[in-house]
Image: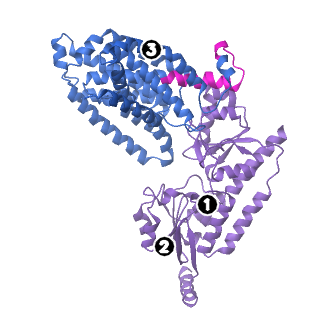
Chain colours: A blue, B purple
């Protein structure tokens, strides 16, 4: 493993960050002159190109980094909490709940149609988690990883069926936008949506870093962790809450982009090791990088057309994961 | 009166055979007796048949996109509407149809009424508008469908009249000094779905004397980024109007967006009903509408 090189790799990643941001601003659906990039530094906005970079591309690049980091961290926490390598942040029903309310918004159902789409997504995600927690026995305080997983899967299936029903009953011509939302897209990102996600991500990362030893203990199983002094009741609600907040905020900004939360923690473990000391900063950084570059691909692969996030995500993440697996012969 | 015309019809048809037709349509050889009980799917095929004057032989319509063309409304209202979207196979069978005309490819997909070969096996022929299976779609494709349907339905005189009517509309186009850039936007606010480089929309903008900013998209329609639209600096924006994609929501999206309202709200715009942006009897009108808007633009400059 890369244990000895973990910190240098992390430092390298941090240095590579500005380069990725510049790439995100420079590359896109249409080629822009170099001076427009330089004008950001001076704050000038002379031409349409300058405007495109500051008002259209900048929110996307920052949004991609934040959402990628948030989903990466949420995925790592989910895999630790559930002790399941196939866990992803949507296991608690967030994506399905958000999708249901977004589809209700798009097809003009009741009061949901009046709320902005990102707020509908956020509320849907939180409401779905509440339902999952309740079904898993949360009120009685007897929640175990298995019951939580099963409740999550069951509620997700129910919400997914309701979402499909609404789509089938509605006007088929409005299906396009609904499907694109469910695959994820950063094309609607605006600067004013970013502060909340930034605060959530920074707060969650600091909290996870501060409690990294408790998280390492959780990896051994909830019972074992309890014997090591971890307050299970507090920890499981805390981390469920953090996962749900991170994923609901991400989904509200970028749609139900899948696979990030699942694959980023594995990539991080293969590169940096499984201890939360590396897993937490690693998942945030690698998640941010991955989604920034996926967003660049979305805008450039079929320029001037744009792909939803889900497609280049699979194209980029799958070979990465497979090549790392081959190199390390994971059992 | 109806009984009398029925008896007369029987008498005449017993003396003279009904005209037969044989046409190769989108890879299927269609031949048989002149259809007497027709079901049309999608609005543009419905309007086409009504315009050809065979409304009395239609037993069902389905899947309207927007308000039916005013001159055809009375005839349209007399025909039962089988479904708001595509009808089920049972519905078409119960209507006793002997011929189906489909506007889009999806009409004969599993989401529509199913495979054309299946219908043919059960004695019901079908026709799919040829724009769905031609590489190049232009006014000739529309006139081809009019001629072929005229032959199938035994109304060749009406078909000729309709083609002449459309050609007359096109002869009214004014020549333009400059080639303006046009954006024709259907729906989707985050990744605008606009007219692409292949298909009737592209041809309409070209005939009107302008350039389509989506002409590099290798499909009839495609999603484009706002970046590309801003850089292309369109001279005219056309908002498509449909029940499922109202022009007002597109307009208010631009007005309320911090960047787009600055750049795009001063650009002249018009609205166009969805039915004028697809291949049908209203396409020529659509071309004239775009041409008039561009001519007005030139006059004000």
Q: Are marks 1 and 2 on the same chain?
A: yes
Q: Which mark is residue A304?
A: none
Labels 1, 2: front one: 2
Numbered range of the magenta stretch:
A40-64
Q: Which residue is mark 1?
A: B73
Indicate the quadrant containing the C terminus of chain B: top left, top right, bottom left or bottom right: top right
Q: Is residue B73 left or right of residue A72?
A: right
- Judge whether A116 appears above or below B144 on screen: above
Q: Which residue is mark 3?
A: A199
Neighbour class for label 3 at 10 Å: few (<14), some, many (≥20)? few
Chain to which the residue tagged by mark 1 belongs: B
Q: Which residue is mark 2?
A: B98
Query: Which quadrant of the structure image shows residue A234?
Result: top left
Chain to which the residue tagged by mark 2 belongs: B
Classify mark 2: helix, strand or loop: loop
Tell me the distance, in whole angstroms, between the alpha carbons under discs 2 and 3: 65 Å
Residue A152 vs residue A310, the one in the foreground: A310
Q: Are marks 2 and 3 on the same chain?
A: no
Chain to which the residue tagged by mark 3 belongs: A
Labels 2, 3: front one: 3
């Amino acid at each position: 493993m890369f244990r000895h090189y973990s910190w240098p790799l992390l430092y390298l990643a941090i240095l590579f960050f500005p380069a990725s941001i510049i790439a995100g601003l420079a590359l896109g659906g249409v080629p822009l002159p170099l001076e427009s990039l330089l004008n950001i530094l001076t704050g000038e906005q002379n031409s349409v190109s300058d405007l495109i970079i500051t008002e259209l591309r900048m929110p996307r690049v920052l949004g991609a980094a934040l959402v990628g980091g948030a989903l990466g961290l949420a995925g790592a926490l989910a895999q630790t909490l559930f002790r399941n390598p196939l866990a992803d942040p949507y296991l608690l029903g967030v994506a399905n709940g958000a999708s249901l309310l977004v589809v209700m918004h798009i097809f003009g159902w009741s009061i949901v149609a009046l709320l902005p789409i990102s707020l509908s997504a956020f509320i849907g995600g939180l409401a779905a988690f509440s339902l999952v927690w309740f079904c898993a026995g949360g009120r009685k305080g007897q929640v175990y990883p298995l019951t939580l997983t099963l409740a999550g899967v069951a509620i997700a299936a129910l919400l997914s069926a309701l979402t499909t029903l609404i789509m089938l009953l509605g006007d088929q011509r409005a299906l396009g936008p609904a499907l694109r939302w469910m695959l994820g897209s950063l094309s609607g990102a605006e600067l004013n949506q970013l502060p909340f996600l930034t605060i959530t991500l920074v707060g969650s990362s600091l909290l996870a870093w501060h409690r990294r030893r408790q998280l390492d203990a959780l990896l051994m199983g909830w019972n074992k962790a309890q014997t090591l002094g971890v307050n299970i009741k507090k920890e499981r609600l805390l981390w469920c809450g953090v996962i749900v907040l991170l994923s609901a905020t991400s989904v509200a900004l970028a749609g139900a982009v899948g696979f990030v939360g699942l694959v980023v923690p594995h990539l991080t473990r293969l590169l940096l090791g499984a201890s939360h000391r590396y897993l937490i900063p690693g998942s945030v950084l690698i998640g941010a990088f991955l989604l920034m570059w996926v967003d660049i691909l979305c805008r450039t692969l079929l320029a001037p057309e744009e792909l939803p996030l889900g497609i280049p995500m699979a194209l980029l993440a799958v070979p990465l994961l497979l090549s790392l697996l081959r190199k390390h012969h994971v059992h | 009166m109806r009984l009398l015309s029925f008896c007369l019809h029987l008498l005449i048809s017993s003396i003279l055979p009904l005209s037969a037709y044989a046409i190769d349509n989108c890879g299927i050889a269609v031949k048989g007796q002149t259809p007497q009980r027709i079901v049309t799917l999608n609005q543009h095929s419905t309007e086409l048949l009504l315009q050809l004057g065979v409304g009395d032989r239609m037993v069902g319509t389905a899947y309207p996109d927007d308000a039916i063309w005013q001159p055809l409304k009375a005839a349209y209202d007399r025909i039962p509407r089988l479904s708001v979207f595509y009808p089920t196979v049972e519905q078409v069978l119960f209507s006793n149809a002997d011929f189906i005309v489909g506007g889009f490819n999806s009409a004969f997909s599993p989401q529509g009424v199913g495979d054309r070969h299946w219908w043919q096996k059960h004695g019901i022929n079908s026709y799919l508008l040829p724009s769905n299976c031609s590489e190049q779609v232009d006014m000739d494709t529309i006139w081809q469908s009019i001629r072929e349907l005229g032959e199938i339905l035994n109304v060749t005189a009406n078909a000729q009249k309709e083609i002449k009517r459309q050609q007359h509309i096109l002869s009214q186009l004014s020549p333009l000094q400059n080639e303006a850039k046009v954006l024709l936007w259907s729906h989707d606010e985050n990744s605008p779905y606009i007219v692409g480089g292949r298909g009737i929309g592209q041809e309409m903008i070209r005939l009107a004397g302008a350039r389509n900013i989506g002409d590099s998209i290798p499909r009839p329609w495609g999603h484009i980024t706002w970046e590309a639209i801003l850089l292309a600096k369109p001279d005219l924006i056309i908002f498509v109007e449909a029940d499922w994609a109202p022009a007002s929501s597109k307009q208010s999206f631009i007005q309320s967006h911090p960047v787009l309202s600055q750049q795009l709200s001063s650009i002249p715009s018009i609205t166009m009903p969805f039915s004028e942006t697809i291949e049908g009897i209203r396409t020529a009108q659509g071309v004239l509408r775009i041409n008039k808007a561009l001519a007005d633009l030139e006059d004000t400059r």
